[in-house]
Amino acid sequence: MKGLIMIIALSAIAVGATAASAEEPLVLEAKIPLGQVAGRIDHLAFDPASGRLFVAELGNDSIGVVDVRARKTVHTIKGLKEPQGVGYVEANGTLFVANAGDGSVRLFRGADFTPAGRIELGDDADNIRVDSKAGQVFVGFGSGGIAILDAATGEKRGEIKLHAHPEAFQLAPAGDRIYVNVPDAGQIVVLDRKSLKQVARWPTRADTANFPMALADGGASILSVFRHPARLVELSAKDGSTLGKVEVCGDADDVFVDARRHRAYVSCGAGVVDVLERQAGGYRHLASIPTSSGARTSFFSAELDRLFVAVRATGSTPAAIWIFRPSP
């Protein structure tokens, strides 16, 4: 009898170990409906203090406010013009929204998101990055520019010119550098925040349509994701030299680094999130996690240890935020 019990116990352990080892690196945990939201969904921002996710519902001319802890949509900001970028300033509770349709950046403040200002950038206001320590908000716009706004007042404090429209860009964690994807110019450029000038440009050559970007290794390397061909290219942040390349899913629009697990997550309109793992010699493909066609934008919160993927309404699939839990 004791032998039988031991065999059963060992079998249970083996089954449990097999199940654990078989678990995907991203596990779908929940789906939060966005309501009657039609069309394309663009970028996301997150406030870890309140647990609110801000969703740029571009095709719906609205911003959805999602309480990820309660797992429901709690507010909708309407009357926008193709919102693309969103940035939240925790210090004063202000949401910055960049609108492609009229080139404006609109401010909303407080628990009820009262309109608190408007800045006219002229054309195609797009990605937003917030530097809380410096009290600045950076917005890519138009045929070539990064606007610098005061995080407290929203006033425009400066502008850095580019040769074409900026897509994703990242602020160096130390120093004054800004790294920018400029796909129409076939470049990744480096800007200086103090002099408001371009200080370097790195041609992308055969790799084109570089939209998503993230910084890795504490800012020592740049991950730029290209659509043609579909691959992630790792570059040195010091001189732009190529450190590695790996194929990824098609129609990528966001990439995030999971520093804890030495991974990168690439969300793609092809309907998957590619999980890449950092190994000796560079990133390697670990898994492709199914999502939904057109679900190409996402946000990874290190504080909550969750990846949020924006899923647009398609046929029988309603617009929603899908929450993935990294594993292990």
Image: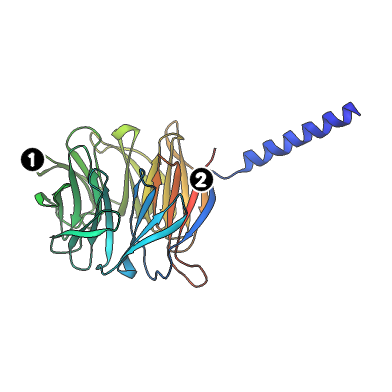
Q: Position of residue 42 (x, y in %)?
A: 34, 60
Type of amino acid at the residue the image marks with label 2? Arg
Q: How many marks?
A: 2
**Residue 200 in view here:** no
Q: Nearer the viewer, residue 98 or 176?
A: 98
Neighbourhood count class around disc 2 (C-alpha, 10 Å): few under 14, some 14–19, many 20 upward: some
Query: Does the residue at mark 2 contact the one at mark 1 (Cβ under 8 Å)?
Result: no
Type of amino acid at the residue the image marks with label 1? Ser
Left or right of residue 203: residue 41: right
Q: Position of residue 201 (x, y in %)?
A: 18, 44
Q: Nearer the viewer, residue 61 or 47?
A: 47
The image quarter in which residue 123 lies: bottom left
Instruction: Please tell me which residue is depicted at 29% across the width and 58% down the height of the picture.
Output: 112
The tag on residue 253 is none
Left or right of residue 102: residue 21: right
* Distance between the alpha carbons at the discs numbered 2 and 1: 41 Å
The image quarter in which residue 104 lies: bottom left
Circle 1 sits on which residue?
Answer: 195
Left or right of residue 108: residue 319: right
**Residue 119 in view here:** yes
Instruction: Please tell me which residue is depicted at 88% across the width and 27% down the height of the picture.
Output: 3
Residue lying furthest right in this view?
1
Which quadrant is the N terminus positioned in?
top right
The tag on residue 325 is 2
Q: Position of residue 59 (x, y in %)?
A: 33, 69
Nearest to N terminus: mark 2 or mark 1: 1
Above or below, comparing residue 161 to residue 178 in the picture: below
Neighbourhood count class around disc 1 (C-alpha, 10 Å): few under 14, some 14–19, many 20 upward: few
Colouring scheme, one of rainbow, by chain, secondary structure, one colour = rainbow
Secondary structure type for disc 1: loop
